[in-house]
Amino acid sequence: MRPTLILRINLLKEAVMSSLDGKNCIVTGSAKGIGRTIGEALMQEGANVLFADLDPAVQVTAEESNAKFGGRAIGFKMDVTNRAQVKEMIEKAVAEFGSLDVMFNNAGVNKPMNFLDVTEENWDFIMKINGLGVLIGTQEAARQMIAQGSGGKIINTASIASRQGYDNIAPYCASKFAVLSLTQSAARDLAKHKITVNGFAPGVVATEMWSQLDKDLIEIGASKQPGQAIEEFSSGILLGRPAAPEDLVGTTNFLASSASDYMTGQTLMIDGGMILV
């Protein structure tokens, strides 16, 4: 690699690190998996993080993250579809840290069903968390940021399923298309307040969610044996493997930092070359 290119990369890394130091962040859906990894990567660069999740294990996540990184982290049990709880979460972050600078709307669920078997209950369950949860989180974070008067960053977790429909996860795909649309709509409305709204779209990520999906897909007959689903989904990845959560944090840290200040309304693919758009 050329010395000038190495220098530019190192300068970008330093810019991201310095611009995250002291930033006050919230990450929803962060008791484990992608959300926990995002939160810990922010802490590693000096940010303060409120880890939020419906899973009460989020308290343990915050404690373990504090022990690892020596930063300020707090855990908060909440439901992203409950506006009162979202407001309470933001109030807690501001009371502890002094402001809200970065909001990650990361919480999401999936429950595979073959297309003709999809029920209203399945649709409502997925769309409420993945769609409405992002709307409420964006609205309430924006209200706090507007009140502060210094702008902010809102970052939404989309998916390759925001760019392509799949037959046995149709409601999930619809919900992630909604995340893509909400990101664009919010970016248009909030730019005047110096609030940027962006997203990132992972592909196949080896987390606890995929372990459960593997079981669910066997149950509905979409695969026959453990590991088959993730192997088949991963077969088209140009880089030759599923992602680990750690593969995403270069992008998520960038989106949270001042290095992305002139970007809004965009959703970045981080899928190893699975979907080319």
Image: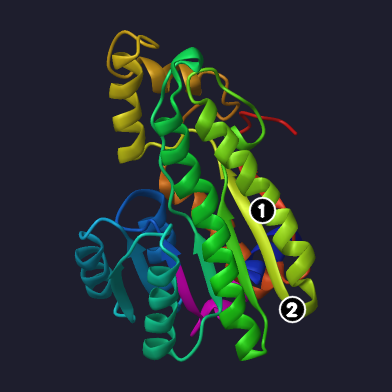
- Which residue is depicted at the point 36% across and 58% down? 30
Between tags 1 and 2, which lies in front? 1
Badge 2 amino acid: Lys
Color style of the picture: rainbow
Residue pointed to by mark 2: 194
SS of the residue under disc 1 = helix
Q: Residue 267 at x, y = what percent?
A: 68, 50
SS of the residue under disc 2 = loop
Please say if 8 is above or below 239: below
Please say if 60 is above or below 129: below
Badge 1 amino acid: Leu
129 is within the stretch colored magenta: no
Viewer can see residue 70: yes
Name the foreground residue: 104 vs 23. Answer: 104
Q: Residue 201 at x, y = what percent?
A: 59, 44
Name the foreground residue: 238 vs 145. Answer: 145
Please say if 228 is above or below 258: above
The image quarter containing residue 197 is bottom right
- Which residue is depicted at the point 60% across and 26% down? 238
The C terminus sits in image quarter? top right
Residue pointed to by mark 1: 182
Q: Residues within 10 Å of mark 1 (few under 14, many from 20)?
A: many
- Which residue is depicted at the point 41% across and 23% down? 230
Q: Residues within 10 Å of mark 2 (few under 14, many from 20)?
A: some
Q: Which numbered disc, 1 or 2, marks the residue that appears first in the sequence?
A: 1
Viewer can see residue 2: no
Q: Residue 153 at x, y = what percent?
A: 62, 71
The part of the chain drawn in magenta is: 14-26
Please say if 202 is above or below 30: above
Q: Residue 140 at x, y = what percent?
A: 54, 72
Name the foreground residue: 209 vs 176. Answer: 176
260 to the left or right of 61: right
